[in-house]
Image (spheres, rainbow, N blue to C red):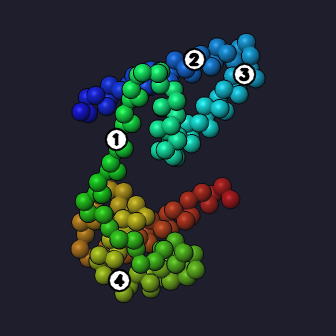
């Protein structure tokens, strides 16, 4: 099944490329016509993508008489949620740093447990070396959060 879908998708990509090349050739001889066609196709494609009923009606209208319209491809399933996705952090460390500086940020981090600290690290992509999510001590996680917030907040200060 996936081989057929991949083949159909590849065929569609080739057809899109050919249509694009034809529009570029038309652009050379009739820029107004090329622009109008691009706008028309864009509006139709957007509406067909947004409205399944319109997409079906469009496919039926463009199918030759006596020819069965090709079935609409099955909608792709959304990717499964990654294992281990974390909850959002209890607060925004950047806002806490902006409001109270390093001391204010450390004061807000102090009562949090390891899991809440890891939520902040994960939410703000602060585990750049893939070590922080393995740590089990609040102090190390607090230091990482403060270090990253300071680094990202002051980044570019030399140019101000």
Marks 4/3: CA–CA distance? 63 Å
Residue corresponding to mark 4:
112
Task: Classify 10 Å Cα crowding around label 3: few (below 14), some (14-19), many (20 and above).
Answer: few
Can residue 2 be seen in the rendering of this structure? Answer: yes
Disc 2 + disc 3, Cβ < 8 Å: no
Q: Mark 2: give few (<14), some (14-19) or many (20+) Cα within 10 Å.
A: few
Tag 4 near tag 3, CB within 8 Å:
no
Closest to the camera, between mark 1 and mark 3, is 1
Q: Which residue is mark 2?
A: 21
How far apart in space, not on screen, are marks 2 and 3 (Cα)?
14 Å
Q: Is residue 59 above or below residue 24?
A: below
Q: Position of residue 38 (x, y in %)?
A: 64, 29
Residue positioned 34% across, 41% down in the render: 74
Report the mark closest to the observer, 4 or 3: 3
Looking at the image, which residue is at 29% across and 75% down?
115
Compare marks 1 and 2 and give the one earlier in the sequence: 2
- Looking at marks 4 and 3 on the same chain, the residue that comes earlier in the sequence is marked by 3
Work out whether mark 2 precedes mark 3 in sequence or the reverse, and give the earlier one.
Answer: 2
Q: Nearer the viewer, mark 4 or mark 2?
A: 2
Q: Which residue is mark 1?
A: 74
Query: Which percent across, then down, holds residue 28?
Result: 71, 14
Residue bearing the label numbered 3: 33
Query: Where 154 sits versus 92, above or below?
Result: above
Q: Are marks 1 and 2 in contact (CB under 8 Å)?
A: no
Proximity of marks 1 and 3: CB atoms separated by less than 8 Å: no
């Amino acid at each position: 099944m996936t081989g057929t879908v991949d083949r159909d998708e590849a065929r569609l990509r080739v057809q899109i490329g050919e249509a694009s090349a034809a529009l570029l050739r038309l652009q050379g001889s009739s820029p107004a016509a090329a622009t109008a066609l691009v706008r028309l196709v864009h509006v139709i494609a957007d509406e067909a993508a947004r409205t399944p009923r319109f997409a079906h009606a469009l496919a039926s209208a463009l199918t030759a008489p006596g020819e069965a319209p090709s079935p609409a491809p099955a909608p792709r399933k959304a990717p499964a949620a990654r294992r281990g996705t974390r909850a959002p952090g209890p607060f925004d460390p950047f806002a806490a740093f902006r409001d109270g500086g390093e001391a204010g940020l450390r004061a807000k981090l102090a009562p949090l447990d390891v899991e809440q600290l890891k939520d902040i690290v994960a939410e703000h992509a602060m585990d750049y070396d893939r070590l922080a999510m393995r740590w089990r001590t609040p102090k190390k996680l607090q230091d990482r959060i403060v270090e990253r917030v300071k680094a990202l907040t002051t980044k570019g200060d030399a140019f101000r």
